[in-house]
Image (tube, rainbow, N blue to C red):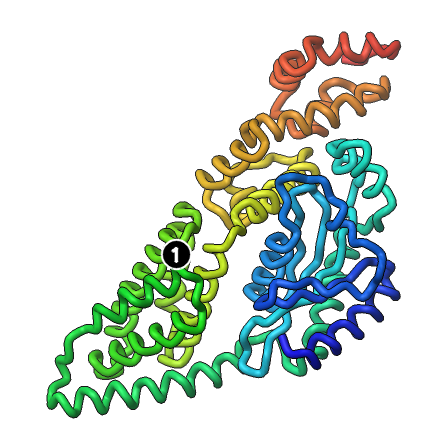
Amino acid sequence: MQELLVKRCMENAAHLSALCGIPAYVLSVLQRILFNQDKTPAFCDECTCSRCDAMNTHLYGCNEAYRWNGKYIYYCPLGLVFVASSVSDDSGNLVGGIVMGPLLMGDSNDVLNEMNDYTRSKAAALPVLSTLKVTDLSEVLSAVTSYSAGMPHSQVGRFVYEQEKLLNVIYSAQESMLQQESDDSPYPIETEKKLHTMICSHDKSGAQELLNELLGHIYCASNFDLATIKTRVVELVVVLSRATIDAGADIREVFLSNTNYIQEIEQFSSLEELSVWLNCIMHRFIAYSFDFAQVKHSNVVYKVMQYVKANYNQKISLDDIARHVYLSRSYLSSIFKEETGKSLFSYINEVRIEKSKIFLLDDSVSLVDISSMCGFEDQSYFTKVFKKATGLSPKKYRDSRGLTGLN
């Protein structure tokens, strides 16, 4: 990240931080440095959470922001909220970002109660914003980083830059085939093997160069027929995914992504779009072979928890939650169980029971209404789940608090 760009981002981040009262940091992706304009220690510097690596957490946030048009809201493993916005260079490549946080979103007690006393005392002083306000913050931050970088959050710069480089490679491939006086030039299998090695070693620039070579060969050997090229690109995505798995990425996540990628490939109507897309996919694979797994899983779990707390009074299906966090049902269930030690449905019932305890304090609300208000199908099922969780029926629980139950 160039010094002038860092300075510009630092200045704009300082203005936004002063206005909102929320810490802001500039992150250089390549240097793996967080620039802090405030001389006081950052919250992350004093965090005692053993599961959290601050640099990887915020690198993940900036990579996701780059993926999602310049802005991303995420949770750290401790449950605190951060907002990231990516910064690109003149070529459209991700070079850094601005990160704001930590902050608390919604009901802060839920998060604070899970912390140890020392961390809770520190976190209790953090800003508390509604979900809508956090979304507003992400939009403003996105505008700030776009202004700082001097370009919009899009692939326009990357599109032009990568197209120019790819054209040069295609010309070279054409000349090579002409010299061999044959369009049936053998596929450069050695280049593919080298690409695998580059991805495993996280060498983005080297992998980019080799990927362009392979694309140049595929384009020329296919006589620039889009349908044929799409088929070959699918094969190339498989090569990239295998290399990414060997580099340490989560095999389930890679396979899930591949399904979506194959669907995306079919939608492209030009070689230029397809080329830029494939370059982005390669960079994304490399990024996710870094140590982002723990961060991503924690982020997903907290988003699931927020979704359940916001919708506990309605029917919640596994499909609904999976769509909300963009994961498959089986992968989501596996992650949630791994991170929390309980099944997703157990957690849903746990939230509903805790909410029902509050309603039970009001003796003007019937048990039938409470079961409905907490998302249970009927009163008998509510009673069964409540008794299993507390050892008491809802009525006895209400009576034990000195209140008169109504049936």
Q: Is residue 43 visible?
A: yes
According to the image, label 1 marks what residue?
Answer: 244
Query: Toward the viewer: 272 or 281?
Result: 281
Q: Quadrant of residue 139?
A: bottom right
Quarter containing the N terminus: bottom right
Q: Quadrant of residue 257?
A: bottom left
Query: Toward the viewer: 41 or 145?
Result: 41
Quarter containing the C terminus: top right
Q: Residue at x 87, y 59 (%)?
A: 21
Q: Position of residue 20 (x, y in %)?
A: 85, 62
Label 1 environment density (alpha carbons within 10 Å; few <14, some 14–19, many ≥20): many
Dot 1 amino acid type: Thr
Figure disc tally = 1
In the figure, 125 relative to 382: above or below? Answer: below
**Left or right: residue 170 compared with residue 145:** left
Q: Is residue 156 visible?
A: no
Q: Residue at x 66, y 30 (%)?
A: 375
Q: Residue at x 73, y 74 (%)?
A: 9
Q: Position of residue 377 (x, y in %)?
A: 61, 25
In the figure, 27 relative to 274: above or below? Answer: above
- Identify the secondary structure beneath mark 1: helix
Q: Position of residue 234 (x, y in %)?
A: 30, 64
Q: Residue at x 42, y 66 (%)?
A: 282
Q: Position of residue 394 (x, y in %)?
A: 73, 13
Q: Quadrant of residue 233?
A: bottom left
